[in-house]
Amino acid sequence: MKTRTLRTSPRLTALAAAALLAVCSGAQATAVGIRVLAQEWSPAKPSEQSTRRLVDDPNAVSQVLQLAWNEARPLVCKTLSNRMGLGRAAGGYTLRDIDCVLDATPAFSVAPNGQNGLTAHLSFGGYLAATSTTPDHFDKALDPRFSINVKMNIALRISVQPNPAQTLRVDAAGFTLSDTKLDSHGLTGDILKFVVSDLAAFFTGTDYKKLAEGAVNGVAMDIAKPFNTALGPINDKLRPPSGMVRTNVWARPELIAIAFGPQAMVPPSNGSLSGVFRWGGQTPGRCDGLALAASVQTGPAPLTGVDGRFDVAYAPRKPVGDFRLEGIGAAGECRYRITGLAAGWQNDLAPKGRTEVAEVTAVRGGPKRYRVTLQGEGWDGTHVTPQPAAQGNYLIVSAPSSSPVIDPEIAANQRAPQVVGRPAPGDRFNRDSAASMTTLPPVIGRPAAPTAPVTTLGARGRSWTVPAAAAPRPGAIRVQQGAATHLNPQPLPPEPPPEKAGTSFRR
């Protein structure tokens, strides 16, 4: 990047320094704002949650950081100049007439730093000019003047404190030097060779980086002081509203957002619910295994973003209530009562049923499961707000379970029917060929006794007879194949030789 060349002036004038800075600086002013959110919520209507923006200022943070930088910038320049001006500090050579000009308006950004911290970054460019001594064989009047373009960053480590009077506090400031470029100001001959071989190696390598960072970080706490002072107006905006506590903090490059919500609430325990469990049009049965569980939401769902979004699934909850059955009334009705509910709050109820087994002839005596559930009679049965007492009845409903339990032997035979007779390789199938296959019915319980031989057609009209002895006999070995269990049939008689591919099948 080109800069103005200074040949004769021992020091940069203020006007020249400003012009050089405007050319070499890449930093652009950026805005960082503050947003304060307040959650409004009531335990009587927990699903109706809203969020208000108490503060929404897109420039508040960058404005105070700019004020602090105006105060810290001279300190950074003075520290760099003093350290560079020490005897033989520049790789064995001494610098004098040092000028330092840093960006008046740095670029700002904010990022999260751990669970309870933020980092504010100030990125800026700068320009330093100096005159250097030369080796002894050079005329002192030829001491070269050169300049350095620099890019730097200050990272402010900010803690988020529980103290409501000082939510944000700068704990440390870290200075880093990211880039340097040396400009020889049009020097020629042996003086240029000296600058390139000796000074350029020092300023563009790690030596100057260590020198500059060590100098500025040595006064880091002095640099942090004006930033802490400048955060005062921000902390005033971050005071929690009456009766609220801080629930979340976010940091984005352009925004710091803080959310407040109601303090954690302890639910009362003076509410109750009573009623009966009634069999709805069914033969009255047992009520054991039927119950109600209750819980309440104790606070708003936490916000998931700076735009006020939230997920009720993560709302804080607490179990409440003590359920008990109080005996059997008319027509098999079961009286119940649940105490210890939160009066005036919405109590969420979870009816608990049971699974029972009944004999069903449709599956030949195998057991099938039925699910017994509770449904509110004339109300939803899942929410109640006692004041302080409430009443609600339930219907007892039973329905087949979606996964009936059937005798394994029955299931195996239903899934894998026995087929006697196999076509020869190369046979083509049609409706007539399918009719020639003989399928044995499922075997239920013990195998049936053989009755008569079975004749089966094969390829080209060939046939063979399966003797009655080939039918499954009592006590036949059971063979496991995959998930199905079936009977092991006797071997079939030898099949005729396979036909060539493409042979047609005709009756």
Image (spheres, rainbow, N blue to C red):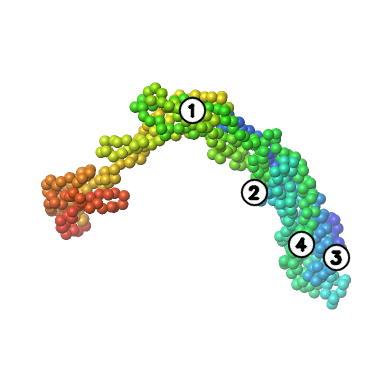
Sequence-wise, which precedes: disc 4 or disc 2? 2
Cβ atoms under marks 3 and 1 closer than 8 Å: no
Say what amino acid the circle numbered 1 marks. Arg
| Inter-mark Cα distance, 3 to 1 | 91 Å
Label 3 near label 2: C-beta < 8 Å? no
Residues at badges 1 and 4 in contact (C-beta under 8 Å)?
no
Lower sequence index among marks 1 and 4: 4
Q: CA distance from mark 1 to mark 4?
A: 74 Å
Which residue does the image show at 40% across and 35% down from the upper left?
354
Query: To which residue does mark 2 refer?
Result: 115
The dot on residue 411 is none
Give the foreground label among 2 and 3.
Answer: 2
Q: Quadrant of the N terminus?
A: bottom right
**Three-letter code, disc 3:** Arg
Q: Which residue is mark 1?
A: 337
Foreground label between 3 and 4: 4
Left of 220 or right of it: where is 501?
left
Callout 4, which amino acid?
Gly
How far apart are the alpha carbons under marks 4 and 2? 29 Å
Q: Which residue is mark 4?
A: 214
What is the C-alpha distance between the residues marked 3 and 4?
A: 20 Å
